[in-house]
Image: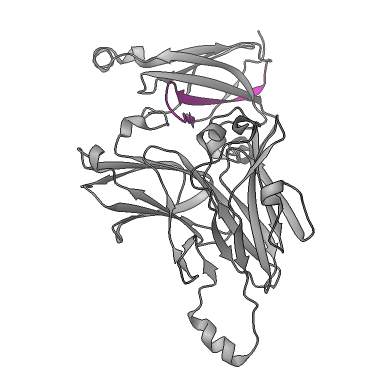
Amino acid sequence: MDAFYPPLPHDTRLAVAVSQGEGPENNQALITWKAADRVRSAPENSYRFCAIVSRHVPDWAVCGELNEGLESIHCVPQYNNSMILRKLRSGKRYFITLFVRDSVRGSTSSYETFEVVLRKASDSNSTKETKKDEVRFRFLRGPPRSDGSFNVQALPLHNAVLEMGSLPPKKGSTLNYQFVIPTNSTKNNKVLLIVHACDGYVRISVFRNGKLLKRSEPFSGFRRFLVVNVHSGQLRFQITNDDSKPKSVHLWASAQADQSPYPKLPEDTSVKVVRRSCSTATLQWLRSADEHAEYCVYMRRETANYLEELVSKASNLCKGGLESSEMVGCYSHRGPSLEALQQDDSIGLIETTVVGLEPAKTYRFDLLATPLQRDQAQSLPYRTVWVRTADSC
């Protein structure tokens, strides 16, 4: 019977951050949760996460029946572990229940219901005096104490487990992750942190046992950070939104850098066009340093006449190539040994020829590398290259 229902993680609590807007109906809440490993690794579209917002304590968390008091339903794909609930009204009490739904069987499993109370703004002068000490943006909250108050805490970032989070569309909004240093695996006294900012600029701050170690400049895309002289205790990673647009980020940390789910791209990530004709283009690139990796080439015929349009980036850097591109093919290679590369670096080159192109046309090629035989393997792009075919054959 248990196999019929979607699996849940051991911790079924929701983390909720509330942002109160200028108007009474402009409040929003960012909810974050853990996903079971079986859901994370399932084929695409096998599951969906849906959050139900209600004004009353819901009965459907048990029986699955929707009663009166329902405000809204929000759903995201299975690879998300956060969502933003908008248009929450001040002075109202909301109950948020998260479900994971099996798209094949139609069955659901529910997380714990979370209660959110949005304080009603007051216009009285006395209230305005006391509101100076209030924090308008309340960050992630943990479980309640016995007296009913809440601890402000960070989400757990587990050793060598990829986590995904979202930042609300407010400059300065933050996500906090806590990483407990594994004492039995820090012989080299180093922890590798990987941050992949998917769709815009963020900043990272690293704290060790409450002390600030590093605050980065704004960046977008893939970054590695190495924390040294680590023996025990806790690290806290704070991701800050650098503008007023929503952001999604991927994070991974471990004392074992070789367990990283990302490929080890070469220093030179350019893709070179070594030959071209009216109907073909031969591309060449350097291998990644991974023992076994897959390289996928994507192609799109360009119709733009302006440079700005040609060099436009993919809307989400974590998803790889443009959605409008077509896959040319994927190539799996086992990398040569380090000794062999030192003797002859030419064996680190990979070459492929794309056929079936049209004369006098411009094509965009994107190359993505993915490590094989790696848990939660992720792709990273090489630099995009454009090719114009010869006018005539």
- Residue 27 % position (x, y): 65, 66
In the image, farthest residue toward the top: 393
In the image, farthest residue toward the bottom: 125
The residue sitting at 61% across, 63% down in the picture is 115
In the image, farthest residue toward the front: 1
Figure quadrant of residue 78: top right
- The magenta-colored residue range is 360-381
- Asked if residue 332 lies in the magenta stretch, the reply is no
User: Taking 134 as reference, is 35 above or below it?
Assistant: above
* Front residue of this view, candidates 179 and 105: 105
User: Taking 302 as reference, is 218 above or below it?
Assistant: below
- Asked if residue 362 lies in the magenta stretch, the reply is yes
- Residue 4 % position (x, y): 65, 31
Figure quadrant of residue 56: bottom right
The residue sitting at 54% across, 72% down in the picture is 136
The residue sitting at 65% across, 25% down in the picture is 300
Q: Is residue 326 left or right of residue 283?
A: right
Residue 178, can we see it?
yes
Q: Is residue 198 left or right of residue 254?
A: right
